Image: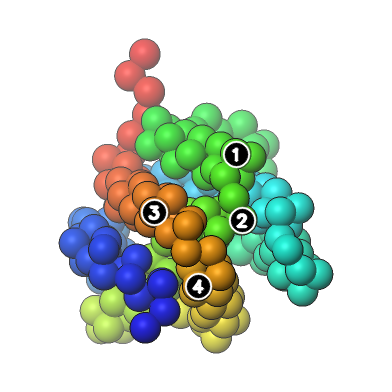
Amino acid sequence: MGFSDTLLDAGSEIWDAQKEPPFVVELAEGSLDEGAFRHWVKQDYRYLLDYARVFALAGTKADDEETTRRLTATAHATLDDEMDLHRSFAADYGISPEDLEAVEKAPTCAAYTDFLVRTAHEGSIAEIAAAVYPCGQGYLDVADHMAALAAEDHRYTPFIEKYTSDAFRETVGWMRDLVDRYGEAYPGERDAMRAAFLRSARLEHAFWEMCYARETWEV
């Protein structure tokens, strides 16, 4: 059993809860209100900008060329591929490119990205790997769950298809392998990796709830 399994076991209650938010269930059914989905598009777009930066920063801390190349490539893929999905959704749901760029992060989104960026600057490469892993594995597991719930194609099917694709599955597998490798190579980092993983997992769950509630700053 790899260290990623240890982390998933430690966060099993959080992990199972990610499949329960109304946003997840209603998106799977195709009944999710467009306003909630637009909020996800805007907030996740802002999230991914920082997520890409975190991978780029991680590349400067990797201890071998291959990992540096892959981390940097993942940063570019996030900007050029995954965010293209968000740009496409934005166009479909009446969000202009200017509006997308001007979005202010909601409190939960800001808390999540602040944690990731701080970890990228101050943490070890092992800690960063554990911090970014819940986003990838979480989306894959939630999307697989959505695919099982969806009775037929609907307006949100492209979301499900993106996050159950072979390409995304391969990326998540690589992220998992990275966590396993660092967990084995740096046993002294395991407590920090566990803490980073659990914080990100909790924030992943909170992100779904934020989108459904269309959370914004109160003042």
Q: Amino acid at mark 1?
A: Glu
Q: CA distance from mark 2 to mark 1?
A: 10 Å
Q: Amino acid at mark 3?
A: Asp
Q: What kind of element bears circle 3?
A: helix
Q: Name above or below for residue 194 compared with residue 68.
A: above
Q: Nearer the viewer, mark 3 or mark 2?
A: 3
Q: Amino acid at mark 2?
A: Ile
Looking at the image, do the residues carrying marks 3 and 2 touch, with CB atoms under 8 Å apart?
no
Q: Earlier in the sequence, mark 4 or mark 1?
A: 1
Q: CA distance from mark 4 to mark 1?
A: 21 Å
- Give the class, few, some or many, for how many residues have Cα within 10 Å of label 1's Cα (few <14, many ≥20): few
Tag 4 residue: 184
**Residue at 26% of width from left, 70% of height from top?**
9
Tag 1 residue: 122
Q: Earlier in the sequence, mark 4 or mark 2?
A: 2
Q: What kind of element bears circle 1?
A: helix
Q: Earlier in the sequence, mark 3 or mark 4?
A: 4
Q: Amino acid at mark 4?
A: Glu
Residue 181's spot in the image, x, y percent?
Answer: 55, 74
Q: CA distance from mark 3 to mark 4?
A: 12 Å
Q: Nearer the viewer, mark 4 or mark 1?
A: 4
Q: Earlier in the sequence, mark 3 or mark 1?
A: 1
Please tell me in which quadrant of the rendered image residue 84 appears.
bottom right
**Residue at 38% of width from left, 23% of height from top?**
217
Q: What kind of element bears circle 4?
A: helix
